Image (cartoon, rainbow, N blue to C red):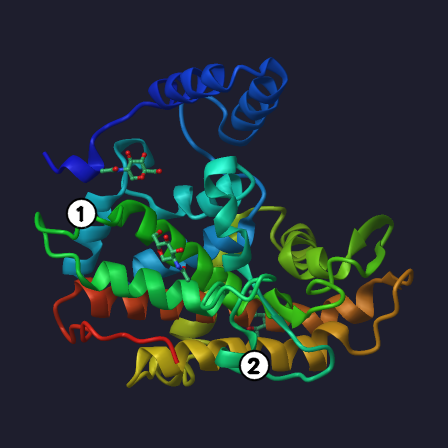
Amino acid sequence: MNEITKPRSTFALTFSLLKGMRKIGSFRLWSIYFLGFVLINGFGGVQAWSKEGHIMTCKIAQELLVPNAAHVVRMLLPDYANGDLSTLCVWPDQIRHWYRYRWTSPLHFIDTPDDACSFDYSRDCHDTHGGKDMCVAGAIKNYTSQLSHYHEGTSDRRYNMTEALLFLSHFMGDIHQPMHVGFTTDEGGNTIGLRWFRHKSNLHHVWDREIILTAAADFYEKDMGSLQKAIQANFTHGLWSEDVTSWKDCDDLSTCINKYAMESIKMACTWGYKGVEAGETLSDNYFNSRMPIVMKRIAQGGVRLSMILNRVFGGLDPLKDTLVAT
Ligand SMILES: *[C@@H]1O[C@H](CO)[C@@H](O)[C@H](O)[C@H]1NC(C)=O
Ligand SMILES: *[C@@H]1O[C@H](CO)[C@@H](O)[C@H](O)[C@H]1NC(C)=O
Ligand SMILES: *[C@@H]1O[C@H](CO)[C@@H](O)[C@H](O)[C@H]1NC(C)=O
């Protein structure tokens, strides 16, 4: 048995969490964490409920894996995932507020200078304290590089390969969400409060979730599986079938990752922020013109995640050990 995938039930996990919290000795803190854990994970299986985009990205990617890569991914997943990567693709969002993982928070996005509408790795990829590489592009390079050292049974023991896989899979979704590469002052649209049809929301959340949920409700009877199939149909034999090869095209991974971030900030400027005023109501016009972009970004995220995993694990075109951040 592979020790990385040592089976661990949700109950066992909960129990160790509980013990850890007792040591802190604060019942209040413990109860908040415990409640959060129960709400997020439930018992008897981890099922995410809040991040449809991540789930679709990971499902699309997993279906495109070559056999070797599919095998390694299954080996790295804990047993309770039942071989399904998408069930754990939201894990990095669930843990980012936990004390032990608070350092991962800046890895979900990039703050670019207001109105610059460009991404420059050395200028923009840092956290608020100037910590180098602490952004979503740096994290993707980091975890890809960790995984590229994985050879069955002899992985680098400094790193947890399961965590590296989950971080990479999640961050490939984030970097394709245009508002995750947004302006600094408004925190990628988070502080731009507005209405989405009848309810309160903000510009960041519109792109994270609202557009996806509205699309699912209007066209797919709220069935995420059908929406995902429709996205897949559009790149296998529809709208984007001619473009998929160029999406996957990548000589130097580090350059490609910078390009994905650049695409996002360009889209954030031309489609995300454009014409939006805080306090206004966004509805049909915004939805109809932006939905195609959201769908395309989910597709690209999935296709490109599979490209990276196939390169790292597929044994076709092994990455060089020197993936340096530039
Ligand atoms: C890797 O990380 C996961 C998630 O944090 C954890 O459950 C698992 O025990 C870790 N594996 C090893 C070998 O430390
Ligand atoms: C790279 O991964 C390691 C292990 O998880 C972590 O300690 C480090 O902060 C990460 N750096 C970036 C930029 O992701
Ligand atoms: C798929 O492509 C058609 C146009 O050919 C478009 O109308 C539809 O919205 C697309 N669906 C998704 C989910 O992207």
Near-viewer residue (214 or 46)? 46
Residue linked to disc 2: 119
Asked if residue 203 shows in the view, the reply is yes
Residue drawn at x 78%, y 56% as measured from the top left? 202
- Element class at badge 2: loop
Q: Is residue 240 visible?
A: no
Ligand 2 contact, mark 2 (Cβ < 8 Å): no
- Residue annotated with mark 1: 157
Amino acid tagged 1 = Arg
Q: Residue at x 60, y 52 (%)?
A: 220
Q: Position of residue 313 (x, y in %)?
A: 18, 62
Compare residues 224 and 286 and report the one nearer the observer. 286
Quarter assignment of residue 278: bottom right
Q: Are marks 1 and 2 in contact (CB under 8 Å)?
A: no
Q: Name the one closer to the observer, 204 or 141.
A: 141
Asked which quadrant contains residue 129, the reply is bottom right
Indicate which disc residue 172 carries: none
Q: Is residue 251 above or below residue 174?
A: below
* Residue 317 in the image: above or below residue 246: above
Going by the image, does 293 lie left or right of 150? right
Question: Where the C terminus falls, by quadrant?
Answer: bottom left
Front label number (1 vs 2): 1
Looking at the rendered structure, the kind of residue marked 2 is Phe
Percent x, y for residue 159? Answer: 25, 49
Instruction: Tell me which residue sits at (84%, 77%) in the image.
Output: 275
Secondary element under disc 1, as helix, strand or loop, is: loop
